[in-house]
Image (cartoon, helix red, strand yellow):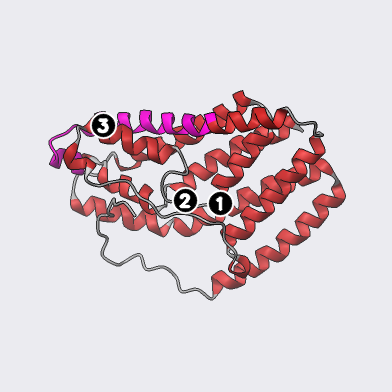
Amino acid sequence: MNADLTLAAFIVAVVAAVRSTWSPCGLSMLATITPLAESGRGHRYRTTAIWFVVGSVLGGASLGVVMALLAIALGALVTTGNELVLVAVVAGAITVAADTRIGGFRLPVHHRQVNERWLDQFRPWVYGAGFGWQIGAGLATYIKTSAVYLMIVLAVLTGSPYVALSVGIAFGLVRGLAVFLGRAITTSAELADFHRAFMAADRYALTAIVVCEAGTTLALSMAVSPLIGAVVAGVFALTAVAWSLRRGRRPAPRTDAAITTPSVTVR
């Protein structure tokens, strides 16, 4: 059971990090740390981007330390593997409901973004690493997907501080590496084209994270009991139908609108 939880934690961490790139703060980084923007400030893009990745990994490690401490505390409790996996199944079901907005349900989030004033006040390594740390920490800026919460729950449920720390680092690393998506942006036209295409993919990114959450939860439920797995599968099937109908009624997102550089502000 612990191996199942470990694998699930890493899978969710990677997918949650990818999905988080579509957050307002993630989009801001893809407009703020580019060859175009850095050259305009008289700085080298590659250097700033590397500092951003370093900061993001440290941010993920910071979250990992917190998860590791919680994992140690959990490990001191007398619990069976099945009980831990059942907790994970419940957490997974909650995150699926939250990300699909079934019945209007959603988990609480905050909408904070990084401070744009850092760009004028500090050297590239300071704002690069500082922005990266906040992004990599997962909970310090805008939370785009409930999978971040699921990742934390799964990492803690492993009961292993080393696994929990590693999961946090993996999350931070993937979030940090996203900055290199903008490595070819050297003109305003390329910036606009990139963000237009990136936002067009948001719908597919959301589907991918929901499929990951549901698939991971279903696999864990089957590991506990085929009966529980069948019940979870049935619930997810109904959820998928309701979600498809809801998405079908929503207008398609516009991808031909003028793209402006996302802001980086504190809220």
What element does badge 1 sit on? loop
Q: Are marks 1 and 2 in contact (CB under 8 Å)?
A: yes
Which residue type does callout 3 highlight?
A: Val
Q: Amino acid at mark 1?
A: Ser
Along the horizontal axis of the image, is 109 left or right of 179?
right
Label 2 crowd (10 A; few <14 / some 14-19 / many >=20): many
Look at mark 1 in the image and give the residue it sits on. 146
Q: Gap in Å between the C-alphas at discs 1 and 3? A: 29 Å
Stretch of the chain drawn in magenta: 36-65
Residue drawn at x 69%, y 29% as measured from the top left: 159
Q: CA distance from mark 3 to mark 2?
A: 23 Å
Residue 219 visible: no
Give me the residue at 56% from left, 57% from top: 107
| Residue at horizontal 63 percent and vertical 60 percent from the top | 97
Task: Find numbered disc 3 in the image and state the secondary structure of the residue it sits on.
Answer: helix
How many residues crowd mark 1 within 10 Å: few (<14), some (14–19), many (20+)? many
Who comes first in sequence, dot 3 or dot 2? Answer: 3
Residue under the image location 20 percent in, 43 percent down: 37
What is the three-letter code of the residue carrying label 2? Answer: Ile
Q: Please name the residue that numbered disc 2 is placed on.
A: 143
117 within the magenta span? no
Task: Choose between 66 and 53: the one closer to the eye.
Answer: 66
92 horizontally vs 203: left or right: right
Q: x, y percentage for residue 155? A: 62, 35
Measured as percent of width and height from the top left, residue 257 is found at 29, 67
The quadrant of the picture occupied by the C terminus is bottom left
Q: Is residue 38 magenta?
A: yes
Q: Is residue 227 above or below residue 1?
A: below
Residue behind mark 3: 126
Q: Position of residue 216 (x, y in %)?
A: 68, 45
